[in-house]
Amino acid sequence: MNKCLSDKQVLLFLMLWDTTHFILDFFLNFLSASMRLKRNGSYTLNRKSKGKPNGKKPVPEEKKLYLEPEYTKSRITDFEFKELVMLPREIDLNEWLASNTTTFFHHINLQYSTISEFCTGESCQTMAVCNTQYYWYDERGKKIKCTAPQYVDFVMSSVQKLVTDEDVFPTKYGKEFPNSFESLVKKICKYLFHVLAHIYSSHFKETLALELHGHLNTLYIHFILFIREFNLVDPKETTIMDDLTEVLCSSSGSSGSSNGSGNGSGGSGSGSSSSSSAGAQNHVKER
């Protein structure tokens, strides 16, 4: 029993150390890039002009910059993430899911914060990923159309509330996880995927300018392999980024395919609905 507890403590310590190292490295790169952009006078990247609007809608960029080979090969480590996401011996599954889900929440929140000033209600009027538009659903199941920053705020606020709830993510010894824990983790992972996908589809240029695309790629690989390992997100939900997933995971030597046994988003009343319809003007799918 003592040995099991000791192994667990060592593992959790290593995970905490890895998280701390990632965050410190992340901030150092971000601060360095920010200072460089300010010196070069190019910190106004992708901001809207304060002049009068010309009434013309911006032409969407068809080319996916994040798929360019010179950028997909960038990452901060060559670690074998397929091994990292596997459940260690002597560790309870729910504890492993809780620890990793909380870590991914903090990392994705941190990654988004670096481009949040460019993700505004004006520049991102809808929560869009490629040709798919996501809606938020409140606690009563009411569909809410919102801007991307509003959607991300809904996601981060709701996830923060869950991961800090002792009844949902217990941290005290002997306290049991709720029966709905797995479905809640699935819901959280679905939300976090939407945020990651939006960063790639709408703010990859800014991420490049800050030279944080290596961090983003590494985080994406780790997250995708984790949700695949435990079937936490319906493969249909992540199809929209399959081209990126194939390139990043195969090039990292960590490709893994889901067996499709996951139950999808888990929980009703929030997230994206399974139905989709083409928009009358722009043929954007709604979810």
Image (cartoon, rainbow, N blue to C red):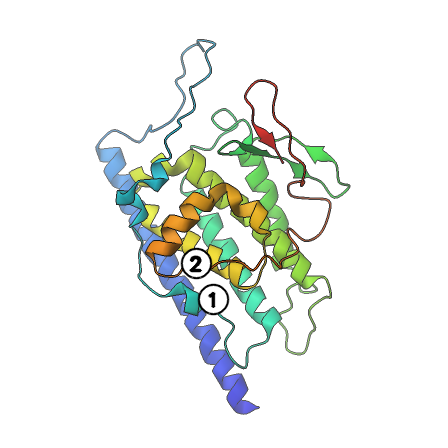
* Distance CA(mark 1)–CA(mark 2): 8 Å
Location of residue 140 with respect to 164 vertically, above or below: above
Residue 120 lies, in percent from the top left, at 49, 30
Query: Could you say where residue 70 lies in the image, as x and y percent from the top left?
Result: 26, 44
Asked if the residue at tag 2 contacts the one at tag 1, i.e. Cβ–Cβ closer than 8 Å, the answer is yes
The residue positioned 61% from the left and 26% from the top of the image is 278
Q: Residue at x 65, y 38 (%)?
A: 136
Characterize the local packing of mark 2: few (<14), some (14-19) or many (20 or more) Cα atoms within 10 angstroms.
some
Above or below, 66 relative to 172:
above
Q: Quadrant of the C terminus?
A: top right
In the picture, residue 71 is in which quadrant? top left
Which residue is label 2 attached to?
A: 222
Q: Is residue 94 above or below residue 42?
A: below
- Identify which residue, 189 or 27, lies in the foreground: 189
Q: Which residue is mark 1?
A: 85
The three-letter amino acid code for the residue at tag 1 is Val
Assign the N terminus to one quadrant of the image. bottom right
